[in-house]
């Protein structure tokens, strides 16, 4: 997979109507509106002239050093491929836009995000190769092994595990993000750079899919959702359903690489509780979560509750306890409800949302 192209290749493969937009400063914005209408999801779901045309438009910006514009074009292609899967209920290989997204993040100095999207590419290539990722014919192998330092053994081990998961859970493996959540996180060897500290990019189609599954008896899908939302923060390492001799942790998270913004207050580890209930979390359940945080010597925790907590907006019951816990023990508990999740699904930056909620509890701010 080569980024090098020439002017003739652009002109020969991109329709005149679209090629003309490349000459304008605002061309990328116009193309983001036109491309999904110009090419159907079916047309770009496989190797085709239409898919190549879309790719070349992204590469035009990439080779011009306009990496943010290239990112937007490749993300649009990825989303269009996901739409094809939803429409036709058939898996589509999405490695092409994912690997270019990784290269774009690498160029703008975002090593953690670049590695993440390489691993998502590996998920796609491993499914296509039925557990085998060939070093000669895939772009992801040399990027991971020669570029990122992952061993050949690790690539082969991950590839086999990815294919095993895709065979066992075909419905949800249309999203490589789910597969990546199901692997270990030993591949996370890069600390995020200051440049990517506030970048938050999530697959909203995947979030909507998980939202549609909420309400299961075991509450697993809210745990998957919470884990995914947090894992999209560069430097956040997540572990789901960890057990001790005395209790179970829905989600254990650790922050790596940040020492200058509000997340440095979390310390290294924090715990999340997920309540997929059709009622508000009351005082007793909230106090129980506080006890869990006490036992881990944590100063921060997140409670994911679809309906929020009791006393919300009145500073009573559980919401009153939320403020008292900080005043008494210096412990901040942030509550994320269904409205917050919906806002993330609409593109709100979760890092900014988390900061706002953290400051509200810590500083006792009025809404």
Image: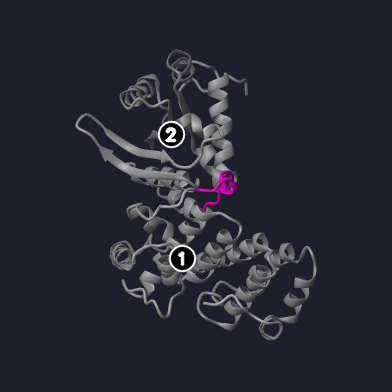
Do labels 1 and 2 touch, CB within 8 Å? no
Could you tell me residue 15's position as x and y percent? 71, 81
- Label 1 sits on a secondary structure element that is helix
Which residue is labeled 1 in the image? 147
> Does the magenta portion include 199?
yes
Image position of 269 (left or right of 261): left
Which residue is labeled 2 in the image? 305
Q: Residue at x 38, y 36 (%)?
A: 274
- Examine the rendered structure and indicate whether residue 184 appears above or below residue 24: above
Q: Main SS type for the magenta part?
A: loop
- Examine the rendered structure and indicate whether residue 357 appears above or below residue 154: above
Q: Which is in the foreground here, disc 1 or disc 2? A: 1
Q: Is residue 90 in view?
A: no
Q: Residue at x 40, y 67 (%)?
A: 145
Could you tell me residue 43's position as x and y percent? 56, 77
Q: Could you tell me how far apart the alpha carbons at marks 1 and 2 are, in whole angstroms?
A: 41 Å
Residue farthest right in this picture: 24
Q: Nearer the viewer, residue 212 or 333?
A: 333
Image position of 343 (left or right of 6): left
Could you tell me residue 44's position as x and y percent? 55, 75
Of pointers 1 and 2, the one earlier in the residue sequence: 1
Quadrant of the image for the C terminus?
top right
**Crowd around label 2: few <14 · some 14–19 · many ≥20 (10 Å):** many
> Does the magenta portion include 34?
no
**Crowd around label 1: few <14 · some 14–19 · many ≥20 (10 Å):** few
């Amino acid at each position: 997979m080569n980024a090098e192209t020439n002017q003739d290749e652009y002109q020969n493969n991109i329709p005149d109507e679209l090629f003309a937009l490349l000459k304008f400063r605002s061309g990328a914005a116009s193309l983001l509106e036109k491309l999904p209408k110009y090419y159907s999801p079916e047309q770009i779901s496989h190797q085709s002239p239409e898919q190549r045309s879309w790719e070349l438009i992204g590469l035009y910006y990439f080779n011009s050093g306009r990496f943010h514009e290239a990112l937007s074009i490749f993300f649009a292609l990825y989303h269009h491929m996901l739409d094809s899967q939803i429409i036709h209920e058939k898996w589509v290989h999405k490695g092409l836009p994912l690997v270019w997204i990784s290269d774009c993040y690498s160029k703008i100095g975002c090593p953690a995000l670049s590695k993440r999207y390489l691993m998502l590419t590996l998920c796609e290539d491993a499914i296509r190769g039925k557990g085998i990722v060939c070093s000669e014919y895939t772009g992801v192998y040399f990027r991971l092994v020669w570029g990122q330092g992952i061993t050949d053994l690790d690539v082969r081990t991950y590839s086999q595990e990815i294919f095993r998961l895709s065979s066992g859970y075909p419905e949800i493996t249309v999203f490589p993000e789910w597969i990546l959540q199901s692997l270990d996180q030993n591949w996370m060897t890069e600390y995020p750079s200051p440049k990517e500290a506030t970048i938050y990019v999530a697959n909203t189609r995947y979030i909507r899919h998980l939202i549609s599954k909420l309400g299961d008896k075991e509450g697993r899908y809210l745990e998957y959702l919470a884990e995914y939302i947090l894992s999209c923060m560069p430097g956040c390492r997540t572990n789901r359903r960890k057990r001790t001799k005395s209790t179970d942790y829905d989600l254990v998270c650790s922050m790596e690489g940040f020492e200058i913004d509000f997340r440095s207050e979390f310390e290294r580890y924090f715990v999340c509780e997920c309540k997929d209930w059709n009622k508000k979390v009351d005082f007793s359940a909230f106090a129980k979560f506080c006890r869990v945080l006490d036992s881990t010597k944590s100063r921060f925790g997140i409670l994911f509750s679809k309906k929020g907590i009791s006393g919300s907006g009145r500073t009573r019951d559980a919401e009153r306890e939320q403020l008292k816990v900080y005043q008494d023990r210096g412990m901040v508990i942030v509550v994320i409800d269904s409205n917050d999740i919906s806002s993330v699904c609409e593109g709100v930056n979760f890092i900014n949302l988390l900061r706002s909620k953290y400051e509200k509890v810590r500083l006792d701010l009025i809404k």
